[in-house]
Image (cartoon, rainbow, N blue to C red):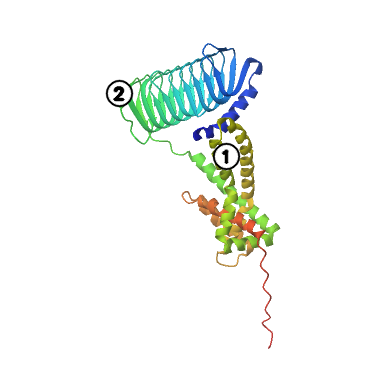
Amino acid sequence: MPSRSKPALLAGLTTFLVLAMGGPALAAETASSELVIIREGDVVEGDLYATGVRVLIEGEVEGDLVAFAAEDITITGRVAGSVLAVAPSVKVEGDVGGSLRVSATDLSVSGSIGSDLVGAVVSGDLDSGSNVGGEVLIWALAMEASGTIGGDLGGTQRRLDLEGSVGGDVDVSVGRLTVTGPLEVAGDFGYRSSVEAEGLDQASVGGVVSQKSPLPPNIRVRALGLLAKVLTILSLTMAAVLVAWGWPERTKRATRLVRGRTLRSWGYGALVVLSPLLLAAVAALLVGLAPASASFPLLAIFIPLIMVATGMVLLLALVAGVPSVHALGEMMPGRLGMFGSILAGSAVAGIVWLVPLVGWLVPLLVLPLGLGGWMLSFRVEPEPEPEPVDDGAVA
């Protein structure tokens, strides 16, 4: 199975299960197999819910189609209703009477869609023979549209190659827009891009052609993000003080290990912090090497493990950085004591975290380093306290 199919598996399975459980069971047929195929001449009366490695619709579905496939979904026949498709590759070479909702790596449409098309894809192609009766709303890295669109064309694309006809307005946000052939737009032609579109002389536009600057990040969103970070800093600082108050000797020992065995502490902590990613990498490797029919059992095993590991890391993150900020605070001038050092170290780490370009270094260093200090504090015997020296002794 191609490795690119793996990101769609979990999202597709979730979507399929939700819709399958919520739909009218008596009015639908359910098919689950390595290959689900409705052959030419066969008719499914009502809705069809299909899941498998491949789903091929060569015949006719009189209702809606909800399909999830580990490799591809191909419609060369006719679906009278709407289609919800989740797969790495989705092809519509036949007719869809209603709307098409799709999440895929590759989308190819050469047939007809009676209503609107909404999709999130890596690459999409509406070729010259395609006909979409309604609106097209696409989020894609690369998009080629050269057929007929009855309504508006919208969405966000990194690259958009456009020709054919659009019955409504064009309103897209793009990195690069190129009119590759004759284009008819009944309404306005608007695009948001820092680069001027190429080939506009081939476009016949019934309304206004306008280039707009890309939208800046919403000021409210940025303000809410800043507030969330400040609240996180305050919450973690309070948690650090409470941990040090309830576990003072262990905190001091972990802090000494952070300062004395820095690389070792960071390495131990990094293994734990990155454990969800490591599990995900192992899962992707095994699923990629295993037969397609074994993909679902493997995912059923690894997905809960990854979720549990992620939850544990998030829980540990509440207290993991205590030895790190304590050690940072001890580097400050003056005698601050344990709680003063924690407050000072938390303040410095929090301020650096708020700096846009370097803030990502804080969780990358503080969390693994502190977590490694905690781990080593349970393995390394505490250093004996130095014996007091009697300066007043007389030989």
Front-lying residue, 364 or 16: 16
Front-lying residue, 367 or 359: 367
Q: Earlier in the sequence, mark 1 or mark 2?
A: 2
Q: Secondary structure at mark 1?
A: helix
Point out residue 227 in the picture as x, y percentages from the top left corner: 55, 45
Q: Amino acid at mark 1?
A: Ala
In the orientation shown, which residue stands out farthest toward the right?
Answer: 246
The residue singled out by tag 1 in the image is: 283
Which of the image's four quarters has the C terminus?
bottom right
Q: Amino acid at mark 2?
A: Gln
Point out residue 74 in the picture as x, y percentages from the top left corner: 49, 21
Point out residue 58 in the picture as x, y percentages from the top left corner: 51, 16
Left or right position of 213 against 276? left
Residue 195 in view here: yes
Front-lying residue, 200 or 7: 7
The residue singled out by tag 2 in the image is: 202
Left or right position of 384 against 2? right
Q: Secondary structure at mark 2?
A: helix
* Vertical position of residue 91 compared to residue 246: above or below: above
Mark 2 Cα-neighbour bin, 10 Å: few <14, some 14–19, many ≥20: some
* Vertical position of residue 390 compared to residue 267: above or below: below
The residue positioned 30% from the left and 27% from the top of the image is 199
